[in-house]
Every structure is written in C-alpha cells, then in structure tokens.
Image (tube, helix red, strand yellow):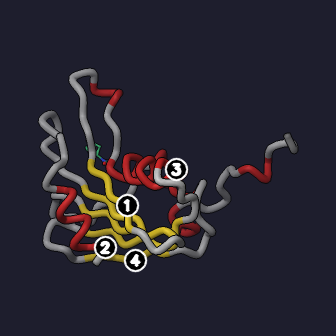
Amino acid sequence: MLLARALEVRERAYAPYSGFHVGAAIAATNGKIYTGCNVENASYGLTMCAEMSAVAQMVADGAQEICEALIIGSGQDICTPCGACRQIISEFAVTTIQIHLCNRSGECQTKTIGELLPFSFNSKFLPPT
Ligand code: THU
C-alpha cells in the first residue's frame, strides 16, 4: 500500500531541473497515509523534498507520529533520504520505525530511522520550555 501510494504521488513530482522524481508515503499511528513529492524551483535551494512535503501533509492533518515510511526515486539505485529529511522524519518517529528505500523498479531496502540517523539531535537536548 505504501509503495502504491508513493508511486502514485511520484507521478506528480515537479522536477524539471534535476529530472529526478521522488515520491514518499508515510503511515501515521492514526491509521492514515500521507504522501508527498519533490517540488523544485528555479531558485534551486528552495526545492522541497518528497519526505518533507509528506511530513508537512501529516502535521497539517493533525497527526504527529510516524510508524513507517517509504521513499521511491526514479533512479536505478535506491533513493536514500537526504540528511535534512532524516532529521525531519526523526522529529516525529521513534528510532526503530522502518523506512523502505526503493529504486524506480520498486526494489527496496529497509532501514530503521535510527540506522539512517544515529545519535540525532532531538528535543531532549533542549532546555524545558
Ligand atoms: N530529493 C528528495 O525529494 N528526497 C531526498 O531525500 C533526496 C532528494 C529530491 C530533491 C531534488 O528535487 C531531487 O531529488 C534531486 O536532488
């Protein structure tokens, strides 16, 4: 199901500059699936990654806990999330959740977010508000 949803949203990626299309699907603990695709910009640095847009959809819908995620790129190699997206996912996930990383043919490797981003900075390092 996550694969089907990520493939569907990857079709809508806006990637005229890189030509690299990415779809992300996130299962939240509320039972819903949130999706996102990459959205590039002529001002390259403003590009939004697929994972980031899926997390934004989730939070806007009122959910804040990821239980599983899948990312599919359009390349021959599996699409592994960039450093910023690892941090963005880890904000809303325990370290043991699985992230499936897929290539254009749908072949996947699975890692935990803790493996992808060990010893991450998180709210526990901040003073109480
Ligand atoms: N991209 C993502 O959407 N997610 C990632 O984790 C890696 C990179 C996008 C950003 C840009 O539009 C294109 O892939 C090439 O970097």
- Please report contact status of discs 1 and 2: CB closer than 8 Å, yes or no: no
Q: Please name the amino acid that badge 4 sits on.
A: Thr
Q: Percent from the top left, x then y, of residue 76?
A: 15, 64
Label 2 and label 3: CA atoms lie apart by 19 Å
Local crowd size for mark 2, using a 10 Å CA cut-off: few (<14), some (14–19), many (≥20)? some
Earlier along the polypeptide chain: callout 4 or callout 1?
1
Which quarter of the figure is the C terminus placed in?
Answer: top right
Could you say whether the residue bearing mark 4 is in a helix, strand or loop?
strand
Could you say whether the residue bearing mark 2 is in a helix, strand or loop?
helix
Local crowd size for mark 3, using a 10 Å CA cut-off: few (<14), some (14–19), many (≥20)? some
Q: Which mark is residue 110?
A: 4
Which quarter of the figure is the N terminus placed in?
Answer: bottom left
Give whichever of 67, 43 is nearer the camera.
67
Camera-near label (4 vs 1) is 1
Residue 43 lies, with reference to residue 36, above or below; the image says above
Earlier along the polypeptide chain: callout 1 or callout 2?
2
Label 3 and label 4: CA atoms lie apart by 18 Å
Residue 115 lies, with reference to residue 79, above or below; the image says below
Most distant residue in the front direction: 61
- Please report contact status of discs 4 and 1: CB closer than 8 Å, yes or no: no
Label 2 and label 4: CA atoms lie apart by 13 Å
Residue in the picture at 53% in, 59% down: 63
Residue designated by label 1? 34
Residue designated by label 3? 88
- Please report contact status of discs 3 and 1: CB closer than 8 Å, yes or no: no
